Image (cartoon, rainbow, N blue to C red):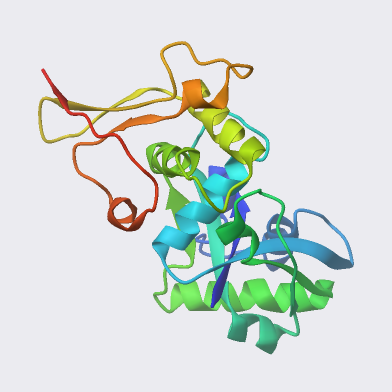
Amino acid sequence: MDYMRFFSKGSDSNEWHVKNPSIDRLRQIFIKANQNSANDVSVFGTLDYRHELQNVAANYQVSPKTPEKTYAVLMTERDCSNSGVKIVKSSGNTGCGCVDIRHAELVGTKDNFSKLVLRIVQRIWAGENRVRLYTAHAIIGELAVMSRLEKGIEENAIANCVLCLSKSEQNFEFPNGSSVVRMVASPNGKADDPIESQRSLVSILRPPPWYYSATAKIVRFIEAE
């Protein structure tokens, strides 16, 4: 299993691709602190892109805010093992069961994490896609799916998903023509409304890969100009 570490700044993403990367700077970005050791570097396991998007969306709703593009750096179990970084399994706190079970914490010294980010850079230079970008509308789509789940998610997590959706831009236009994709929480969604009244209406023109395998009940509507 691979593991992913989130960060939100595009400038942090660029640091992994510069000609002469600073290992100290990358380590600080990775552990989000300038310290000698890190015992609570939170990561989430992933087997594919759908897992990655679920992990990002589930963490987004913990502190509801307007969905924006998010970045992550990926590492493998071998990366960690060869760098002396330990992977300690622990339960996440997103309220989404399938995501929380993938949670782990990385434990190691400053030197261990320097070796880890160096190895990640080496793999990037070898052509591997280790730095990921998740667009706002992809995150919104996954939040919409989560807001319709009936099992494996806590009620407050559903409410938070809906709150995130109510803060988001509602319309996305595909480049292929006249149809509009709409993802809306409710016409005038408010955080204190009953959850059921804010259940997401997801309007999609071309269902993304996660749509077909999601257990959520999705309402599809296409509005053509």
Q: Is residue 191 at all visible to an observer of this figure? A: yes
Task: Return the residue nearer the eye: 207 or 31.
Answer: 207
In the picture shown, does residue 24 fall above or below 87?
above
Does the image show residue 14?
Answer: no
At a point 57% along the width and 56% down the height, the residue shown is 15
Q: Position of residue 162 (x, y in %)?
A: 52, 29
Quarter of the image with the N terminus in it = bottom right
Q: 140 or 116: nearer the eye?
A: 140
Which residue sits furthest right? 36
Write the residue at 81% across / 54% down: 33
Up-down relation of residue 151 to residue 182 (above or below): below
Horizontal side of 14 relative to 220 (left or right) equals: right
In the displayed structure, does residue 8 sit left or right of residue 110?
A: left
Number of numbered markers: 0
**Placement of 86 over or under 32, stated as above or below:** below
Q: Residue 54 in the image: x percent, y percent?
A: 49, 53
Q: Nearer the viewer, residue 33 or 168?
A: 168
Residue under the point 61% across and 57% down: 97
* Quarter of the image where the C terminus is located: top left
Residue 211 at what x, y percent from top left?
Answer: 31, 50
Residue at (74, 58) in percent of width and height: 28
Q: Is residue 13 left or right of residue 111?
A: left
What x and y, as percent, mark residue 175? Answer: 17, 34
Which residue is farthest top?
188
